[in-house]
Amino acid sequence: MADSTEKKKKIREPKEVVVIKNTYDYQRMKLDRLMKNPEKPVQLPERPKEKKSTPDTPDFVRNVMGSSAGAGSGEFHVYRHIRRREYARQKHIQIMSEKDQKDEDFRQKIENNQKLAEERTAKKRAKRLKKKELIKAAGKKQKKTTETTSEQESNSSSDEAESMEEEEKQNNGVPEREKSEDVVADK
């Protein structure tokens, strides 16, 4: 008997007490709960649909008495009700037109901001590319000058070697430098 009661009682793990201080903590807690059981389907709330705030009012109302003193109480109530609905309809039309105007202004503002940002980036891009081309051109000039100087050096060294060979031939195989050293040594 004691064994069966022990099996029925489950030992619960103590849960951490989470204090939610801001929306970040709340969202983190929700995500942690979702990630504990990934097979469970996620319920995403749908956006609330716009309610039609005005009831359907007819465009043209026939046989309605005015709010004159001679009208009966029944006609006056009908008139008052239709007038209230008409005011609500006009207010709704005005609110919708203001909302459309604000949406259009916002869309234009976003487009203008995108155009300005694109112009700025295009200007900066052109500046970067121009700078890059100048650096490339300067690098090519340096290469050309180093190549020409190295060619000149190689040409001058080859010219010197040729002139040395000619001198040796003229001086019977003894280079000019050695001759001048011999002369200096004799003195």
Image (tube, helix red, strand yellow):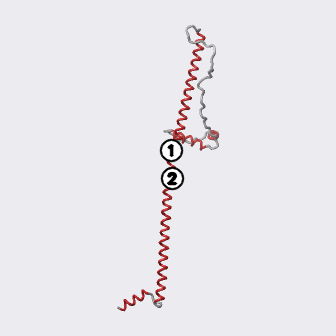
Q: Quadrant of residue 37?
A: top right
**For marks 1 and 2 on the same chain, the one whose residue lies earlier in the sequence:** 1
Residue at (54% x, 30% y) in the render = 98
Give residue 170's position: percent from left, percent from top.
Answer: 47, 89
Residue at (48% x, 62% y) in the render = 138
- The residue most toward the bottom is 186
Q: Which amino acid, mark 1?
A: Leu
Closer-to-camera residue (35/75): 75
Evaluate if marks 1 and 2 touch, with contact meaning CB atoms under 8 Å apart.
Answer: no
Residue at (47% x, 75% y) in the render = 153
148 lies above or below 39: below
Q: Quadrant of the N terminus?
A: top right
The kind of secondary structure element at disc 1 is helix
Q: Which mark is residue 116?
A: 1
Give residue 118's position: percent from left, percent from top.
Answer: 52, 46
- The residue most toward the top is 70
Q: Which amino acid, mark 2?
A: Ala
Q: Quadrant of the C terminus?
A: bottom left
Identify the residue under disc 2: 126
Give residue 110's position: percent from left, percent from top.
Answer: 53, 40
